[in-house]
Structures are given as structure tokens and as C-alpha cells.
């Protein structure tokens, strides 16, 4: 990463009421092996109360803008509009990158000559004394590699693309509060671009630790899946919206996790039952005409 032809990368980070998470993310950005002079960070405050504050003492090029339209996809679009870089890297405020995240993601992106977008790996980091909910989230967390290779999308917590590709595909579908990463990836594939998995471009994140947090997340994802169907946005087939496992398949899968003790497996299964019930209630609520809520 030396010489005059190093691409300027705009890292776009939406944030809503997570000042502490954002600061941790930015601190990790300051340790990137990618040249800091070729990096700008665009923080998009998506209506936080109080407003997000960033005191830049790390010598980074940081822009903070505000997007009042609810939803991280609207915020990402707003960030892309002010981005100066030829390359875009998307992540979330509750994530932090490995040291070579940008270096690896950019190298893979540039090796495909602008005809591909890249999804890096996502690793779930358990707290020192994980709650049962955290164990459930760790056991059932989405697999970035399988999402990319099987369901043909990358989460926006770890997405690289060129500005030109982003403009060609168009912005994220900002009617969605969840599932916009799927829709954008599928739309890009329909436009003839390729999706590439890069395991060495690693983003870390933590699991939800409370039952309330896990339920709110599950309800948001349920609403996102429903909206993808209602808006006709399942570009590569509705099978890629469906949950990975049925209720019974999930129960058997959880009970067979040998890395967990018998007590942990039973506890996690109990959490799974509660989560599935919450998803069913949310589906019924939406079917009766209620709107998806921001959570």
C-alpha cells in the first residue's frame, strides 16, 4: 500500500443512539493498515437523541452529517451522496474492523476491475460471561460466507463497492427498515455485477445480550422479510428470503450443538421458542395492517 495510486476510500457508518459503539468503531478505524491519508469516514447520524458527537483526536478525516429519515438504508444513501472516495466501504456503528479490513477488502475489490462488489467476514465476539441470549445469538447468528455463496447477498455491516458500481445499481431501498442489504445485492447481481466473498476482510460485532434486544431484532427482521415480498423485491427468488431452518429443524440443530453443555442447549432452545413466538406475533400484527416499526 505505497505509491501514488492508492484509492481514496469512503467508509460510511450509519448510527442511531449508539455514541459508545460509534467511538469504538472509529478508534479501530484509526489502527487500519490502509494509509490514513487515503481514508475518509462519513458518520451519518440517523436522528439520534441527543445528536451524535465526534471529537476527532485521532487525526482521521471524519465528516458527520445528519439524516432525519428513519432507517439505516436512508442514512447510508445520505452518506454516499457526500462521499468523496472512488471506493465505498460500509459498516455499522456497533461493529469494529480488524486491522487489515480495509486493506484486504480494497485489494479484492480492485482485483475485479469494478465488475464486482465484496462482502467480508463477520465474527461474533462473545462477552466474557455470556448470557443465555448471547449464547443463542452466537449459535444462530447469520453466516456471512453462506449468505454470500448461497443466498447471494452481503450484509451492509461489511460491504465494499466502487462508487461507479453504487451509482449504476442505485442506492439502498429506503422504504425498508431491514433486508435492504439483500435487496441491493440482488439488484446488483441482476445488473450483471458479481458478488465476491473475502474472508480476510474481517468485521467484529457483539451479540445481543438481553431477551428484549433479541426480540426487537427478530421482529425487525420479520418485518423486513415481509416487506421484501410485498414490494416485489425478491429479485433472485423468494426462497432466499425464507428462514434457514423450520421450527423443528432449528430445535434438532440446537440440541445437537456439541460445543454446548446440555443445560446450555436446553436454555438456548427456550430462548429460541420465545423468539419464534415473537416473530409469529409480529407477522400477525403486520398481516392485520400494522406498519413495520423502527427498533
Image (spheres, rainbow, N blue to C red):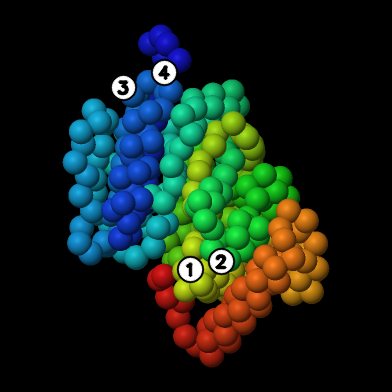
Q: Residues within 10 Å of mark 2 (few under 14, many from 20)?
A: many
In the image, 186 versus 123, the foreground residue is 123
* Mark 3 or mark 1, whichever is nearer to me: 1
The reply to whether residue 165 is in sight is no
* Mark 2 or mark 4, whichever is nearer to me: 2
Farthest residue toward the bottom? 288
Taking the spot 42% from the left edge, 57% from the top edge, the residue there is 73
* Mark 2 or mark 3, whichever is nearer to me: 2
The residue indicated by pointer 2 is: 133
Taking the spot 41% from the left edge, 70% from the top edge, the residue there is 295
Comes first in the chain, label 3 or label 1: 3
Distance of label 4 from label 1 (alpha carbons): 43 Å
Number of numbered labels in the structure image: 4
Q: Is residue 32 left or right of residue 48?
A: right
Say if mark 2 contacts mark 3, CB within 8 Å. no
Can you give x and y, in whole percent of width and height, for residue 104 in the image?
Answer: 54, 27
The residue indicated by pointer 1 is: 210
Distance of label 4 from label 3 (alpha carbons): 10 Å
Element carrying mark 2: helix
Say if mark 2 contacts mark 1, CB within 8 Å. yes
Q: Is residue 295 left or right of residue 119?
A: left
Taking the spot 40% from the left edge, 71% from the top edge, the residue there is 294
The residue indicated by pointer 4 is: 6
The residue indicated by pointer 3 is: 37
Amino acid at each position: 500500500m505505497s505509491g501514488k495510486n492508492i484509492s481514496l476510500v469512503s467508509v460510511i457508518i450509519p448510527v442511531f443512539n449508539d455514541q459508545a459503539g460509534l467511538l469504538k468503531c472509529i478508534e479501530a478505524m484509526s489502527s487500519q493498515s490502509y494509509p490514513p491519508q487515503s481514508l475518509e469516514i462519513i458518520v451519518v447520524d440517523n436522528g439520534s437523541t441527543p445528536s451524535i458527537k465526534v471529537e476527532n483526536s485521532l487525526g482521521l478525516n471524519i465528516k458527520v452529517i445528519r439524516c432525519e429519515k428513519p432507517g439505516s438504508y436512508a442514512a447510508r444513501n445520505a452518506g454516499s451522496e457526500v462521499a468523496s472516495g472512488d471506493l465505498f466501504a460500509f459498516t455499522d456503528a456497533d461493529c469494529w474492523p480488524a486491522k487489515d479490513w480495509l486493506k484486504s477488502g480494497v485489494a479484492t475489490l480492485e482485483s475485479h476491475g469494478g465488475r464486482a462488489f465484496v462482502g467480508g467476514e463477520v465474527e461474533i465476539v462473545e462477552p466474557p460471561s455470556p448470557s443465555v441470549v448471547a449464547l443463542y445469538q452466537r449459535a444462530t447468528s447469520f453466516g456471512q460466507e453462506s449468505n454470500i455463496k448461497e443466498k447471494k447477498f452481503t450484509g451492509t455491516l461489511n460491504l465494499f463497492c466502487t462508487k461507479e458500481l453504487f451509482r449504476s445499481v442505485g442506492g439502498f431501498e429506503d422504504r425498508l427498515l431491514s433486508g435492504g442489504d439483500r435487496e441491493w445485492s440482488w439488484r446488483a447481481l441482476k445488473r450483471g455485477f458479481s458478488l465476491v466473498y473475502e474472508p480476510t476482510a474481517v468485521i467484529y460485532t457483539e451479540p445481543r445480550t438481553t431477551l428484549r434486544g433479541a426480540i426487537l431484532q427478530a421482529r425487525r427482521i420479520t418485518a423486513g422479510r415481509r416487506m421484501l415480498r410485498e414490494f416485489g423485491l425478491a429479485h433472485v427468488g423468494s426462497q432466499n428470503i425464507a428462514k434457514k431452518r423450520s421450527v423443528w429443524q432449528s430445535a434438532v440443530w440446537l440440541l445437537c450443538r456439541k460445543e454446548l453443555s446440555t443445560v446450555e442447549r436446553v436454555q438456548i432452545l427456550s430462548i429460541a421458542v420465545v423468539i419464534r413466538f415473537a416473530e409469529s406475533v409480529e407477522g400477525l400484527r403486520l398481516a392485520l395492517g400494522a406498519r413495520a416499526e423502527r427498533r
